[in-house]
Structures are given as structure tokens and as C-alpha cells.
Image (cartoon, rainbow, N blue to C red):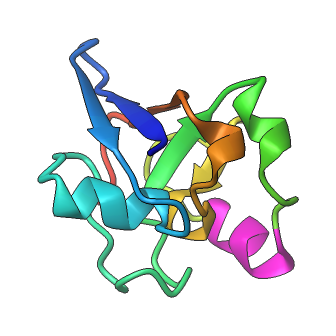
């Protein structure tokens, strides 16, 4: 089963085993990870599941959709080239070991 490591702004790390096909946001909520709010429940409509995905992981996910791109413009924490909505990131064996950094704030 792939693992995802969630890194809080203070450097605290939480490693979670995630079944393939599950979204990074769902795994965080299920594991009780603070820092992912997910107000819209994963519909890419609120930007409260914003995370930073660095290389080489970023290249293993599909490109940002137009809808996700628009929502990322409305994040509370600064948008960077590494910004993604975790509700749009589906875990696969290709991303085993994925590291996502959580922003300072979501709302």
C-alpha cells in the first residue's frame, strides 16, 4: 500500500498508508491530519485542501484542470508552482512515498 507523508509547517510529519484510488485529501481526513479542512468535501470548490507537492511527485499527477487552477487562485496561503488541491490527487503505486507540505492556514 502506498504511503503519503503530510508535513506540517512546523516540520511535524505524519506518514499514512493509503489505498490506491483514494484521494490525498480523503486519506488526511480519515487519518485525522490537522491542516486539511476540505469544506466542500472534495468537489474542488473551496480550496481548503490546498497542499504543496514538490518534484518529483508533482510530475506523477495529471496536470491541473481549469477548475483547480481557478480555485488555487483563491487559497489563503500563498500559491506556488507546487500548489495543488489534495482532493484532486488520486493515490497510485506510482506515488508511493509522496510527500505533501501543508500550508500555514486554509481558512
Residue beneath the point at 50% across and 45% down = 51
Question: Does residue 29 lie above or below 45 as drawn?
Answer: above
**Secondary structure mostly seen in the magenta stretch:** helix
In this rendering, would 68 be left or right of 91? right
* The one of 74 and 92 positioned closer to us in this rendering: 92
Res 81 visible: no
In this image, 41 relative to 4: left or right?
Answer: left
Residue 17 lies, with reference to residue 56, above or below; the image says: below
Q: Quadrant of residue 29?
A: bottom left
Q: Position of residue 59 (x, y in %)?
A: 85, 39
Residue lying furthest front in this view?
1
Q: Quadrant of residue 5?
A: top left
Q: Quadrant of the C terminus?
A: bottom left
> Which residue is depicted at the point 53% across and 60% down?
20
Q: Residue at x 63, y 71 (%)?
A: 71
Residue at point 60% right, 63% down? 90
Where's the N terminus, which quadrant? top left
Q: Nearer the viewer, residue 20 or 81?
A: 20
Asked if residue 85 lies in the magenta stretch, the reply is: no
Q: Kindly tell me whether residue 17 is visible in this rendering.
A: yes
- Where does the magenta region start and end? 65-72
Q: Number of labelled discs?
A: 0
* Percent x, y of residue 61: 77, 52
Q: Which residue is most to the top?
A: 11
Residue 92: quarter of image: bottom right
Q: Picture coordinates of residue 60 (x, y %)?
A: 80, 43
In the picture, measured across the screen, residue 32 lies left or right of residue 75, that is: left
Residue 70 x %, y %:
73, 73
Amino acid at each position: 500500500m502506498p504511503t503519503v507523508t503530510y508535513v506540517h509547517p512546523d516540520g511535524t510529519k505524519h506518514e499514512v498508508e493509503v489505498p490506491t484510488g483514494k484521494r490525498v485529501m480523503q486519506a488526511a481526513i480519515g487519518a485525522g491530519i490537522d491542516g486539511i479542512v476540505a469544506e466542500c468535501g472534495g468537489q474542488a470548490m473551496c480550496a481548503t485542501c490546498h497542499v504543496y507537492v514538490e518534484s518529483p511527485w508533482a510530475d506523477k499527477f495529471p496536470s491541473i484542470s481549469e477548475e483547480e487552477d481557478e480555485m488555487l487562485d483563491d487559497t489563503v496561503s500563498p500559491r506556488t508552482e507546487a500548489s495543488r488541491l489534495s482532493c484532486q490527487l488520486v493515490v497510485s503505486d506510482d506515488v508511493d512515498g509522496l510527500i505533501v507540505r501543508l500550508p500555514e492556514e486554509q481558512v
